Amino acid sequence: MGEDGNTSIFNFSYTSFLLVGFPGLQERRPLLVLPLTFLYVSIISANALVIHTVVAQRSLHQPMYVLIALLLAVNICASTAVMPKMLEGFVHYANPISLHGCLAQMFFIYFTLLLDYNLLLAMALDRYVAICHPLRYTELMTSHLLGLIATFALTRSLGVAVPLVVLTAKARFCRTSVIRHFTCEYIALLSIACGDLTFNNRLGLAMRLVTVTFDLALLGSSYTRIIYAAFRISSGGARAKALHTCGSHLLVILTIYLSGLSTSIVFRVAKTVSQDVQNLLSAIYLLLPGALNPLIYGVRTKEIRQHIEKMLCGKQSPQDIREKSQNMREERELPG
């Protein structure tokens, strides 16, 4: 009986947890509910506005704008995977969640994060073809190719997210049932696991390094060639437009990769950093892209901005004015 009891204790693992985000704030945590709710509503509204604009305007039914809309749709999914449970945790000090719920949340966090990376690669390919091979753009960037890119993005994202979730599900969580984090991140769950976690840590680090290194190498190579080709364009207006579009994509790339890398480095290297700082860095890299991306693309992308201004303020774009003038001339020329 004693041996069976020791075995059961040794194999014990929690199947439900309490998420406690920003534990150092204690009673001040409910004060964050209103600003975070406003942030969540703003993220959903801003991303949905740009997506609606791309879908509603036939002139925006081009690969670049479709990819932007897909990226912003992923932003909405990523924020929704984190924010509702995060807000619930600020209303109640202890935020209960089951192991299966925790694993599901972790899957959606990393699945959407990988989709972001893959869509950025697809955007780099689109700009590379548009600027380096403009005469073959419509021939190469077909709906069939976009379908293949979407399939690759989904497969690659699943190929990274699923192994992380499966490996985490096999771990034993016997240290405590309290996760001092507002969401079920991979590192947060491993911090309460027991046993030999060397393989888990190495696999998680290897997947991040390989993914980020591979993506950054492709992105760096693509945009180096794109910028070089843009400077060789003879027309000043076309050159400025190409560089401006690439600048928007590069801003988004820096936002997503730098925030993610800084968080990973702090979690793995700076052991003395407080839990609140770790929570803050996670919030930045999980929520900042969703907040900034619609602003970057909605403001810096002229075609999208003009349609949004027309929709919200009734302001007509130069193209609409030209089309209206042309229609009036044609009507005057018609025989009475």
Image (cartoon, helix red, strand yellow):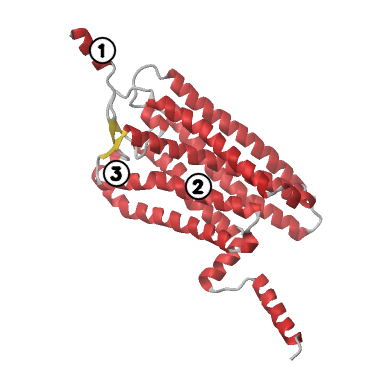
Q: Which mark is residue 74?
A: 2
Going from N to C along the chain, the mark reached first, 3 or 2, is 2
Per the image, label 2 sits on a secondary structure element best described as helix
Residue at horizontal 41 percent and vertical 31 percent from the top: 186
Q: Nearer the viewer, mark 3 or mark 2?
A: 2
Per the image, label 3 sits on a secondary structure element best described as helix
Q: What's the distance in space between the residues labelled 3 and 2, CA to CA?
A: 23 Å
Q: What's the distance in space between the residues labelled 1 and 3, CA to CA?
A: 35 Å
Residue where numbered disc 3 is placed: 89
Q: Which mark is residue 7?
A: 1
Q: Residues within 10 Å of mark 3 (few under 14, many from 20)?
A: many
- In the image, is 123 to the left or to the right of 239? left
> Quick one: which residue is furthest to the bottom in this view?
336
* Badge 3 amino acid: Gly
Tell me where residue 334 appears, x and y as whole percent.
75, 86
Q: Residues within 10 Å of mark 2 (few under 14, many from 20)?
A: many
Q: Nearer the viewer, mark 1 or mark 3?
A: 1
